Amino acid sequence: MWPGERGADDDNGDFNSQSNHACISEEVKRNLLLLLESQPRGMNLDSLDTCYRDKFDSKLDFREHGFDSLEDMIKVVQEIR
């Protein structure tokens, strides 16, 4: 755990995804934001990893960044932009 982090649970026992944003590299954050912004009408979550791989020639592995789901990772990236 990094100094100042509260861990995976907040005081209510709920998942605190904010603590995980430090695990996402700047490159992945930038790439995700570029991809999401390129789709103004939105994007199907099921196709996001395929679109990411096609556009950036790299696999998007949410587990590698400490998330339980791709949806959790996207929420954090959108919150910190």
Image (cartoon, rainbow, N blue to C red):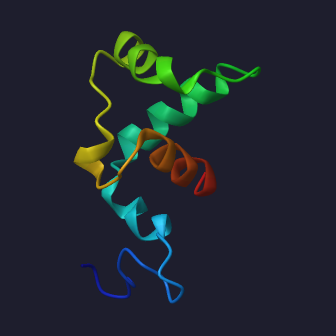
Quick check: 29 above or below 57?
A: below
Quick check: 23 above or below 34?
A: below
Nearer-the-camera pick, 15 or 40: 15
Residue at the front extreme, as displayed: 13
- Residue sitting at x 38%, y 39%: 28
- Residue sitting at x 38%, y 63%: 20
Quick check: 73 above or below 13?
A: above
Nearer-the-camera pick, 67 or 77: 67
**Number of marks:** 0
Residue at the right extreme, as displayed: 41
Question: Residue 69: where, in percent of width, then height?
Answer: 40, 44
Quick check: 8 above or below 27?
A: below
Q: Is residue 45 left or right of residue 57?
A: right
Question: Residue 22: where, in percent of width, then height?
Answer: 36, 63
- Residue sitting at x 28%, y 36%: 61
Q: Quadrant of the N terminus?
A: bottom left
Residue at the top extreme, as displayed: 54
Question: Residue 26: where, in percent of width, then height?
Answer: 39, 47
Asked where in the image residue 51 lies, by quadrant, the reply is top left
Question: Residue 60: where, in percent of width, then height?
Answer: 32, 30
- Residue sitting at x 27%, y 25%: 59
